[in-house]
Amino acid sequence: MTLTETRTPPAAIDPAAAPPVRRRPRFIRYVLLSGGGIVMMYPLLWMISSSVKPSNSVFTDESLWPAVFDFGNYARGWTALSAPFEVYLANSLIIVTLSIVGNLLSCSLAAYAFARLRFAGRKLFFALMLGTMMLPGHVLVVPQYVMFDKLGWLNTYYPLLVPHFLATNGFYIFLMVQFMRSLPQELDDAARIDGCGPFRTFWKVIMPLCLPAFATTAIFTFISVWNEFFSPLLYLTDPELYTVPLAVRQFMDSEGQSMWGEMFAMSFVSLAPVIGFFIAGQKYLVKGIATTGLR
Amino acid sequence: MTAPARALAAAPRRRRRQDRAGYLFLLPWFGGLLFMIVPFFASLYLAFTEYDLLTPPRWAGLDNFREMLGDALLHQSLKVTFIYTLVSVPLSLAVALGVAIVLDRGVRGLAVYRSVYYLPSLLGGSVAIVMLWRYLFGYDGIVNDALAWFGITGPAWTTDPDYALSTLILLHVWTFGAPMVIFLAGLRQIPAMYYEASAMDGASKWRQFRSITLPLLSPIIFFNLVQSLIASFQTFTQGYVLSNGSGGPADSTLFYNLYLYQKGFAEFDMGYASSMAWLLLMIIAGFTAINFLTARFWVFYDN
Amino acid sequence: MDDRHDGPRLDRRRLLGLAGLTGLAATLPACSRGFGGKGGDDGKIELNMVWWGDAQRAELTQKALDMFQAAHPGIRVRTEYQDSSPYKDKLAARFAAGDPPDLMAMRFDSLREYADRGTLLDLTPHPEMNQSGLTSSARALGTVGDKSFGVPSGLNTIGFIVDKGLTDKFGVAIPDGNTWSWDDFAAFAQQVTKASGGKVYGASIDAWTVANLLVFARQRGEDFFTADGRLGATAATVTAWYQLVADLRKAGGVPPAGFIDQNNGTSPAQSYLAKKSIASQIIPTNNLLGYNQACGGNLQLLRVPGETQGPRRGQSIDTPALWSIAASSRHPAEAVTLLNFLINDTEAAKVAGVTRGVPASRTVAETITSGLEPDNKRSSEFLAALQKEKLPESYPYPVGASKLTNILKTLTTEVEFGRMSPADAGKQFIAEAQKAIAP
């Protein structure tokens, strides 16, 4: 909350940028933005507050400022599971890092083909790609499980990783296709005249211009893979291999006793890398401005 | 060979080279297609069987599809899903676009706002957040306490069948962060010189929005629209966590995908679930096709 | 990662580099955890055992398993546990894919879904599984026909808890739990609401919980589910059940429509009792400790009302979960050994405690009761007292019964908000339930 409030600068801080007449609307805009920010921040604050409440008062002590503090949730939560919590963090980091690499490589290749190359069957394949996004995952669970079992991949990270290297997520391909299609065709023509083949054009011309799309893909991949629950649940059986969401869920039993305080503490711990990555990654969203200057 | 003849012979060769380059770039994707196509066809086959997960499937022809016609819960789930999609998709996209445009206009501390507005999407469907929603929107939760200040008696947001779906839509709109980030990335690709040029011509902000921002952002708007529709028709987690998988109160949040899951995993009727899945695929494909067909009238590409 | 293929000449080097990078990323950590680098085979027989619960239960269970592995050095037990709802999804998927665990916790209401389809091991031909310490009604919980497909991992029943701290504060006397009628209960609940000035409601009756309705039906002389797996309840009974709650709501004994969230979960810390917005409710007795901790330590445990007025008793001995063995287990003998250990080993039962309910074997239960925490001791003694009385038996839920939970929930909401009369809801419930569990 303080974060947004201190970031509500009166227009006076920036006198050169705006003539005096424009101060009022800008001030109002900041007030509205910050007010909205508080609404958006509330869940995080609540989570932090819950993480330092004793398990039994998480739901009965309604105040954001705990009546009783229990910082022990963090220490206990860190060590209560069969492996210390850093193991789960490391597992998740490995999976997330490789997934991002895989998604960026494989999806950008496919997206370039769909967006900039003309080849037989392009429309059909594109429709097929979209089609793969449309079938509810629940009915694929059993066939996929059988398939990965036949491949001998159960209880390994392969079922979680290999699909990312094979561009199986149409969302990212489609996203990049839309960004690439909005770049002018003259870029490719110029590159071709300079003697560039498709790959060189892709690597030297298109990729740098799509940085915001890549940053978006990396951020979304991080978040979705980091939070992914059902696939790791299915394919991992060795608790040492568990990812963070599986570990966090082990603090609770929805039909009985749960270690709420510990669960909230570790939920917050597991949220930190995501927030960190988002803040780091969004720099590259801004970088797009510089690159568009090329045009 | 004469020059025109050579050109004629070269054309197919160039096309072949183009084809080859295309397939080469798609190579990983073709590999992935193999991974997807096997379970895909397996589920298509299961759609025509009676399959209880525990004993081998038995061929049932069109039985599952026939059963759908008289399944009142299926019709309820279609209704819930359509209402949810038709209301929440335009609403959340409009909010996302609006906030993105405000944030794009050189706001100080942009990074902070962007992060803060993205937070709910990060927290999304986590167990912890669902607990919070229950407690915010409970009968005597904070929201109703706040309304009571203004003398308004709030409804039972999550337990009254007349309100539960609206509460979920609100929850969804609140997580507008993902499309917002995509809009922001798209806005960043619009060259500033267009705005500078039109500002010199004395164009108003609204005019700039209409004639520069909207057309140049249209591929991204299109993406968000198609993607949100697909995702919305498949909504599962939100319905699942808030109603503990029941679709309650009184089936008012029984999303299609939630009912499908209940059929497949709680009631051991995976054959029926599979046929439901393929019906949904056809519905989504229909909407997506309409999107693509109308796209030529409002989506502008630079080439 | 076979991205290496002939491309246009200009691009080949780049592409090779890219492919190499891709391959590297996937293979580099190949020898480490999660990439198939399994530990050496030490010749032990490995059993996979799965259950649901939280980390606390896991710790206690692991202690018992350590004792087992010390006593059976040739067997290694590889365990996995989850929250109950993802647990059952994964279990179904593993069975469907032909990769079931050896020993698993089985939901009482799912037993027949699995057993009737031949996926569970019949324990009757395995005399090594000693069930002689179990009463016949405890054994009946895992029995389908003349076969035994599961052994209760613990026993429980339902009980009525009352927050004495609240009733004392408002000066309301708690009726005698062994003899109170539903009318006594209604009067008590209204008194609390009235005395608190509407700040605290007397009770919540979770009308949508099948286990509660089941007891009510028995009190009226009906088996909700019959021994041969049919629906035995009548529309009149379901109607009476809804009517009871509706009347009490009108009189103010239970909260108004929409106050109680059916899907709130059954965790003690989240309960309305812990929030002090109600003064009494029905719980599974094995959760008494958790509720008492969450509610401030002044809970009284009573029997369900109406036990002495109806044609017969309603309460029965139940189980939160059974232990079952997969029919396709590759090591059935060892799995039976482990199961027998979990049921009959007193030392193991001592460390594992009563997180899954009172041990099914009476001899084991009697040995460990004295060493329990006061609340667990209280619920164990409550159950032991019931076990000595003549109670109707509880039969495994028939196939299709899982749908009943949602049907009951939906109709409860319809009645709660006055969108349907108790009579109509009762009729509709029976119609839908019969359709759901028809063979």
Image (spheres, coloured by chain):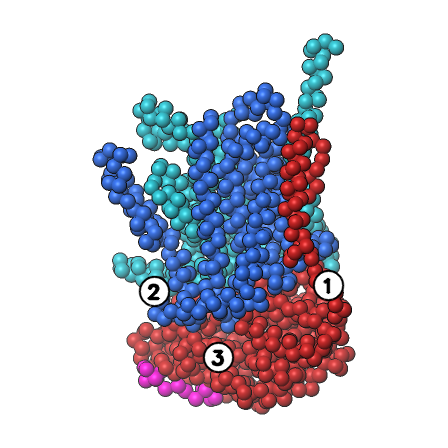
Chain colours: A blue, B cyan, C red
Chain letter behind tag 3: C
The answer to whether marks 2 and 1 sit on the same chain is no
| Residue denoted by label 2 | A65
Residue A182 position in % (x across, y down): 50, 30
Extreme residue in the left direction:
A20
Q: Are marks 2 and 3 in contact (CB under 8 Å)?
A: no
Q: Nearer the viewer, residue C49 or C97?
A: C49
Name the residue that disc number 1 marks.
C40
Give the secondary structure at mark 1.
loop
The kind of secondary structure element at disc 3 is: helix
Magenta span includes C260: no
| Whole-number angstrom distance, CA of label 2 to CA of label 3 | 28 Å
**Callout 3 and callout 1 share a chain:** yes
Write down the quadrant of residue B140 in the picture.
Answer: bottom left
Drawn side of residue C43 relative to residue B81, left or right: right
Q: Residue at x 35, y 37 (%)?
A: B106
The amino acid type of the residue labelled 1 equals Gly
Dominant SS of magenta comes to loop
- At 46% from the left edge and 66% from the top edge, which residue is drawn? A74
Q: Quadrant of the N terminus of chain C?
A: top right
Observer-nearest residue: A264 or C190?
A264
Residue at point 33%, 26% (across, down):
B199
Q: Pointer 3: what residue?
A: C289
| Left or right: A241 in relation to B82 | right
The residue segment tinted magenta is C167-180
Q: Of discs 2 and 1, which sits in the foreground?
A: 1
Secondary structure of the residue carrying tag 2 is loop
